[in-house]
Amino acid sequence: MLEPCSAEDSSFEADCIVADLLGCTNSALRLYSEKEIETATAEKAMDFAQRRLLHEPLQYILGKWEFYGREFYVGEGVLIPRPETELLIDSAISELKGKTQPVCYDLCSGSGCIGITVSKEIPDSRVFMLEKSEKAFGFLEKNVAHNGAANCKPVIGDIFEESPFEEKADIILSNPPYICSDVIPTLQPEVHKEPQMALDGGENGLVFYERIAKGWIKALKPDGIIAVEIGDEQGESVSALFRKSFSDVRVIKDFSGNDRVVVAKNIFNCRNWSI
Ligand code: GLN
């Protein structure tokens, strides 16, 4: 039934809907008979399917989605966590290995999936999170509580203004809006249901990276690191931008072989510090 809006994943999406209504996992569905499934879910499942056919993202219909093995509330007004973003978490964990009580920033936090996950994976970290949209911030606060992320501090604010955080960062993480403004109208209808401000990276798609590279370097500790998610065609442009102020810049590819994360280290700054 969902084929018109989800050709490849229609049976997966249908399973997600039914499993959600039954309160079980997708794999546990095989334990139910067809009759049981039909009576328990018929009306509600049809309602969900109708919404899906109008291109509402599955994640908004379910109201939650998984990221790095944890559950995050999502809905209109907040970007849906994507599996590619898990690579940014892996990069942060590997960069912070051996540091005690690292301070981490998550800029443009959205649902909070990045900051919350890092705070759970590195339990002695302290994570400062910045989000501009009040709607997204509502989800962010709920997700901090839902995941028991006591070491996270969410703050409402704009990355184009001065840092509101009182401590300098060992690592700044961000998955900022990075789609070129003129590409946005060409995206699939589901993406249009997500907040434009979480997607639109300005005319060249680079506005947020420019701000982070120039404006946030001073919020880093001397040996601090910046790691950002990028669009699959932005490896060169974003690394060139970071090379202007950072000495060690690397592009990391995701599981599909696309450029996905840029890591920039502040080595010059570090040397100056130790002199
Ligand atoms: N940090 C959030 C995420 O990765 C939101 C990103 C954004 O709003 N661009 O899902």
Image (tube, rainbow, N blue to C red):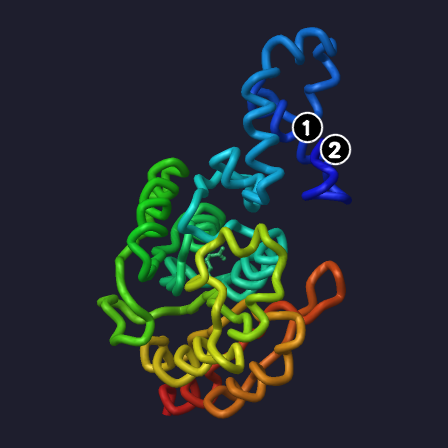
Q: Looking at the picture, which amino acid does disc 1 mark?
A: Asp
Few, some or many residues within 10 Å of mark 1 (<14, 14–19, 20+) = some
Q: Quadrant of the C terminus?
A: bottom left
Q: Nearer the viewer, residue 41 or 239?
A: 41
Query: Horizontally, is 129 left or right of 8 in the view?
Result: left
Q: Where residue 15 is drawn, which disc sits there?
A: 1
Looking at the rendering, which quadrant does residue 220 occupy?
A: bottom left
**Callout 1: SS:** helix
User: Where does residue 135 sit, x and y in percent of width and height?
Assistant: 33, 50
Residue at horizontal 62 percent and vertical 8 percent from the top: 39
User: Where does residue 262 sit, x and y in percent of width and height?
Assistant: 58, 74
Q: Disc 1 versus disc 2: distance between alpha carbons?
A: 6 Å
**Callout 2: SS:** helix
- Whether 149 is drawn above or below 216: the answer is above
Residue at horizontal 67 percent and vertical 35 percent from the top: 13
User: Where does residue 151 sit, x and y in percent of width and height?
Assistant: 33, 49
Q: Nearer the viewer, residue 203 or 28?
A: 203
User: Where does residue 167 sit, x and y in percent of width and height?
Assistant: 26, 67
Kindly indicate whether the residue at mark 2 contacts the one at mark 1 (C-beta within 8 angstroms). Answer: yes
Q: How many marks?
A: 2
Q: Nearer the viewer, residue 169 or 159?
A: 159
Query: Horizontally, is 130 left or right of 203 in the view?
Result: left
- Whether 212 is drawn above or below 95: the answer is below
Residue at horizontal 49 percent and vertical 48 percent from the top: 121
- Whether 148 is drawn above or below 123: the answer is above
Q: Where residue 11 is drawn, which disc sits there?
A: 2
Q: Quadrant of the N terminus?
A: top right
Q: Looking at the picture, which amino acid does disc 2 mark?
A: Ser
Looking at the rendering, which quadrant does residue 235 occupy?
A: bottom right
